[in-house]
Amino acid sequence: MFNWTSTQRNVAFAGVASWTLDAFDFFILVFVLSDIANNFHTSITKVSVAILLTLAVRPIGALIFGRLAEKYGRRPILMSNIIFFSAFELLSAWSPNLMIFMVFRVCYGIAMGGIWGVASALVMETIPDRSRGVMSGIFQAGYPAGYLIASIIFGLFYATVGWRGMFVIGAIPILLLPFVYFKVPESPTWLNNQHRKEKVALWPIIRQNWKVCVFMVVLMTCFNFFSHGTQDMYPTFLKVQQHFSVHTISIIAISYNIAAILGGIFFGSISEKIGRKKAIAIAALLSLPVLPLWAFSSGSIAVGIGAFLMQFMVQGAWGIVPAYLNELVPEGVRAVLPSFVYQTGNLLASVNATAQAYIASTHGGDYGLAMAVVAGTVAILIALLAYFVGPETRGIIISGAVSKKESVI
C-alpha cells in the first residue's frame, strides 16, 4: 500500500468513504427504532419493517446503478449514487407518518443498493492486484466504520437533536462529492474495456455460469443473516433487554465497531496468505464460542467484551467478501454482478430484523435468544459453504489494462 500512486490512494479513499457513509446512513435507523415507534404510536416490530424494506429493494439498486456503471463508467455513477442516498436520508427526517417514512426508506434502499458494487469495482480495478486482500478488508471495514460513526453521533447528538435530527445529520455524505469529482479518475479496466469496445452481457453470463451464481447468492444470504443478525437488533437488545443508558449503548457500539474494523482488515490480509476460503471459514467458526458471552451475559463489561469479539469474527469473515466476489466474476460485469448477488442475499435475509423481533416478542422479550439462534446457524453454514463448496480465487489478476488471468466463472 505504501508503493501506491496518489491516484490509487485517492480512489481507495473515495470507495471506502462512500461505503462508510452509506452504512452510516443505514445504521442511524437501528439506534432510533424504539423512538420512531413511540413517535408514530406503533410497535418496534412494525417499525423494523423499514429495515426489511431497505434491504429487500437493494438488488434493484444494484441492477440499476451497476448496469449504468458498466455503460457510463464507475465514477459518474458513484457520484449520482451518493446524491440519491443522501437526499432520501434527509427526506426521512421529515416523514409525517410511518407510511411516508417507509416510502422514503424504500427509495433510500434502492440508492444504497448501488454503492457497494460500483465503489468496490472502482477500487478493485484500480489498486495493485497484490494489495487486493488487505484492501478488501479495508473496504468492507467501511461498513462497521459507518456503524461506528452512527454510534458516536448517537452518543453525542441524539439527546439534543432527537431521531429526526439524526437523519438530517445523515445527509453529510453529500460533502464527499467534490473530492470524487476533482481527485478520482475512472477505472483503468473500464476505460480499457471501452477502448477495445468489448461488451459483456449480464444475463448470458448468469445463464452460462448459474452454478457459481447460485453459490454466490446462497453464500451472501448467509453472510447477510450473519451481519444483520448480529447488528440490527443489538442496540434494541442493549436498550430494551439490558436496560443500558444511551451513553453505555454508544460506548459498547463504538467498541464492537472498532473490533469489526480490525477484524475485517486482519482476516482480509491473511486471506492473501492462506486463501479466501480458509480465512472465511476460520472467522465464521471462531464466532461460535463467543455466542454465550455475546447474547446471554449480563453487565456492561461482559456484554461489551462479547460484542467486541463477536464483531471481530463476523466482520473478519466479511472482510474477504469484496475481493472474493470481484474475483469470481469476469471483466465487464464487476460493477453489477457482485453487487447484485450481494444485494440478492440482502433481499433473502431482509426478514432478519422482523423475524428476530417476532422471536423475541414470543419468548418474553429475549432478543439475545433470537440473535444467537440466527448467528450460530449461519456461522456454521458460511464455514461449510466457503470451505467445501466455493472455488479458491486468491491470485487472480483483475486490475490494470489487461487481465492476465480471467475469472474462475
Image: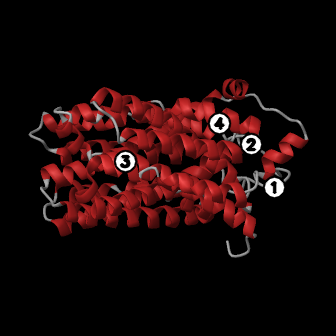
- The nearer-to-camera label among 3 and 1 is 3
| Mark 4 secondary-structure assignment | helix
Residue 114 lies in quadrant:
top right
Which quadrant is home to the N terminus? bottom right
Q: Which mark is residue 66?
A: 4
Residue picked out by circle 2: 73
Whole-number angstrom distance, CA of label 2 to CA of label 4: 10 Å
Which residue is found at the position 24% from the left and 40% from the top? 36
The three-letter amino acid code for the residue at tag 2 is Gly
Q: In the displayed structure, would residue 98 be above or below residue 408? A: above
The mark nearer the N terminus, 4 or 3, is 4
Question: Horizontal and vertical percent for residue 57?
Answer: 47, 30
Residue picked out by circle 1: 400
Pick the residue in front: 163 or 383: 163
How many other residues sit within 10 Å of disc 2, few (<14), some (14-19) or many (≥20)?
many
| Mark 3 secondary-structure assignment | helix
Residue picked out by circle 3: 167
The mark nearer the N terminus, 3 or 1, is 3
The three-letter amino acid code for the residue at tag 3 is Phe
